[in-house]
Every structure is written in C-alpha cells, then in structure tokens.
Image (cartoon, helix red, strand yellow):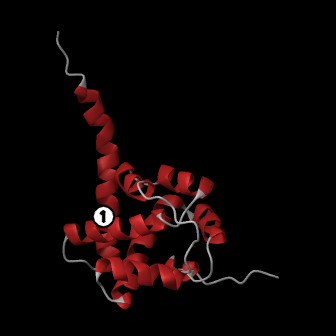
Amino acid sequence: MITDVRAPRKQQQQPNGTAYEQMLERVRYEGAYPTREKAEEVVHLVLSGLGRQLTGDERVDLAACLPVEAARVLTAQIPDPEPLTGWAFVKDLAARSGASPATTRWNTGSVFAAVTAHAGPDLITRILSQFPTGWALLFGRAELTHAA
C-alpha cells in the first residue's frame, strides 16, 4: 500500500489553520471589519509592529501561544533596540499603513483583544512590564504606575 506522506502533515496543520481562522474571526468581530481580508490585513500590521517591539522570553512565549500563522508574522520582525511608548507605537503603525491614528488605535485594540485571548492575563502582564507607558491601554487595561 502506498501512502501519501503529506497526509499526516495536512491533518496536523488543520488545527493551526482553524485556530488562525478563529483568530481572524475574533478580530473581525471585535473591530467590526466588513471582510476577513480586512481583518487579516490589520492582524499583519499590528503583529508586525508588536514583533518590532517585543523581545526576550515574552516574545518566545507569545509566539508559542499564537496560531502558527500569527506567530510567523510576529517573529519575522527584528526587534527595535528602543521600545516605543504606546502612543508612539500607534503613530508608527499609522504612518506605515497610511491610516489615521484613531483608526490605527482601533485596529490595535481589536488585534490585542485576540492576542490576549490566546496569551492569557499572566503573559500579557509580563509583556506590559517590558514596555514603556501607554501599552496597557492598548490591551484594554488600566495603566499602572510603578513605584519609584
């Protein structure tokens, strides 16, 4: 009997593809985007930007939590040496996409809601502790001040 060695690989990839599709649907719902393609465009923009900011164990742990397709977008980016504030992150994405800062802020919140669902609150807390001010609001959390 001849078997197709690719068959198990397709079965193995199906759950990841399904997870990515579910992530896109969540982003589409959260952001009220008219199409799946628009949601995917926003996911790529925001995860690429996050990939330019996130380093260390948090980057590795987040990539492990995300669907494979989303993790590839995140990890394909080389992190910048200096992390941006939350507002500077939004302005940077707006400049790259040609969208307004308000639209970009909306897009970021939509994607980060889906990221939080995959990562969980503990990892998001670790990620936020790595960044300068303004990031907590992007993840739908109150900005906490650190004691001096």
Left or right placement of residue 119 versus residue 128 in this view = left
Left or right placement of residue 33 versus residue 142 in this view = left
Q: Residue furthest right?
A: 148
Q: Residue furthest front?
A: 81
Measured as percent of width and height from the top left, residue 85 is found at 56, 80
Element marked by disc 1: helix
Measured as percent of width and height from the top left, residue 67 is found at 39, 52
Q: Nearer the viewer, residue 123 or 55?
A: 55
Q: Residue at x 37, y 90 (%)?
A: 102
Left or right placement of residue 116 versus residue 123 in this view = left
How many marks overall?
1
Residue 83 lies in what quarter of the image? bottom right
Q: Residue at x 61, y 55 (%)?
A: 56
State the quadrant of the C terminus.
bottom right
Q: Is residue 112 positioned above or below 79 on the image? A: below
Q: Is residue 81 positioned above or below 75 on the image? A: below
Q: Residue at x 61, y 71 (%)?
A: 128
Amino acid marked by disc 1: Leu
State the quadrant of the N terminus.
top left
Residue 144 lies in what quarter of the image? bottom right
Measured as percent of width and height from the top left, residue 71 is found at 42, 53
Q: Nearer the viewer, residue 17 or 87?
A: 87
Q: Residue at x 66, y 70 (%)?
A: 129
Neighbor class of circle 1 (other Cα within 10 Å; few <14, some 14-19, many 20+) is: many
Q: Nearer the viewer, residue 139 or 99?
A: 99
Q: Is residue 63 positioned above or below 120 on the image? A: above
Q: Residue furthest top?
A: 1
Left or right placement of residue 110 versus residue 128 in this view = left
Measured as percent of width and height from the top left, residue 57 is found at 61, 53
Q: Which residue is mark 1?
A: 24
